[in-house]
Amino acid sequence: MGDNRPPCEQAGRDCVDVATEFFALAHSLKRMVNARCRAAGLSYARVQVLHVLDDRGTTRIGDISEHLDVAARTMTSTIDGMVRDGLVARRTDPRDGRAVLVEMTPPGRATFDRVIAIRDAVLAEVFASLGPDDRDRLLELVRTLAGETAKAGEVAGG
Amino acid sequence: MGDNRPPCEQAGRDCVDVATEFFALAHSLKRMVNARCRAAGLSYARVQVLHVLDDRGTTRIGDISEHLDVAARTMTSTIDGMVRDGLVARRTDPRDGRAVLVEMTPPGRATFDRVIAIRDAVLAEVFASLGPDDRDRLLELVRTLAGETAKAGEVAGG
DNA sequence: AAAGATTGATCCGTCAATCTTG
DNA sequence: CAAGATTGACGGATCAATCTTT
């Protein structure tokens, strides 16, 4: 064998190649979804916020940022804009004066219902190219990586 | 089976579920890589720019933004910061007075070599959890989706 | 006119510091 | 003091408008 690199480096390059294409796909996919959602009247960040409120009802702002895995600063300013545009409303938590509850307004509901259908259509348009078995396989691989990512994140965060 | 939804909607939901976990993984993975690279002295956006210059040598700014699939505005301001920090230098293309060439400086080279090793280690740390066969399978699925994304993007962009 | 880059306005993301409430 | 939210300063992303060069 004329290969002078140790196995770990070979595996490393292999990993990097896969990761690079994975990142590129994620980037263009997010770009596409974002563009279609914005064209329908809602940025993807706002779609995600309304999605949380749709699932869980009125929610503390800290829980939203935690669930979406973004910094507190991000959520404060995103909610600022959404309040400005009448999509959600802020209300102090009666049980805890420190916390702030975020509530979807009727216009927010209407906008969400319209845009979420478009988002789902875009995703279906792309992921339907895989077929059910391949989607299952992809989901399995993604979950394995997500588990590993969580572990690596703990190491960094601890 | 008590399922009253037509097959297309079932497939749609299936697609959305896979896509949701895919996006979540991409988000946390990018967050992690970004954090580790920044801790080493370079944001991931800058790593990507230097990576292009490492692969292709001195490159027109428009070619960099096209290759990384970001808006021209993004590249202008990212390069502004990198010039400010001495990582790259701007130079007018002698063949075309409209174009601007971006060149890696020696400090940029040193920083890149240091940080790219860290980036690769982070990616290997996560993707090595898959094993070679699963990585091949993932790469195949990613490429299928990338092809579909490109098609869907043309429709939207055309 | 078309192509390449810059600029303006704005949104979303980070970290670090601050204020308020428990 | 600790927890929750806001604010400041800034990087990086978008679109749309502008300026220069071909």
Image: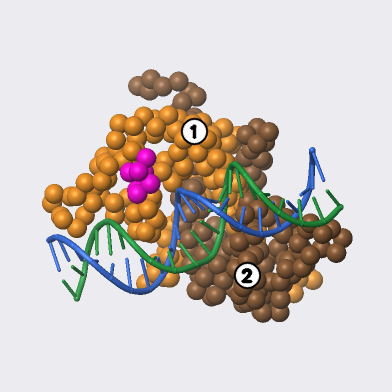
Chain colours: A orange, B brown, C blue, D green
Q: Secondary structure at mark 2?
A: helix
- Residue extent of the magenta highlight: A79-85
* Quadrant the C terminus of chain A occupies: bottom left
How many numbered dots are placed on residues in this image?
A: 2
Task: Give the residue pinned by disc 2.
Answer: B82
Residue at (39%, 32%) from the top-left corner? Answer: A111
Image spot of residue A145 (x, y percent) = 49, 56
Q: Chain of mark 2?
A: B
* Amino acid type, residue under disc 1 in the picture: Ala
Q: Vertically, is B64 above or below B15?
A: below
Badge number at residue A89:
none
Q: Which SS does the magenta portion mostly show?
A: helix
Res. C6 image quadrant: bottom right
Q: Is residue A140 visible?
A: no
Q: Chain of mark 1?
A: A
Marks 1 & 2, CB-CB < 8 Å contact? no
* Amino acid type, residue under disc 2 in the picture: Met
Q: Vertically, is B118 above or below A21?
A: below
Q: Vertically, is A16 above or below B138?
A: below
Whether the magenta-drawn stretch holds residue B143 is answered as no
Q: Secondary structure at mark 1?
A: loop
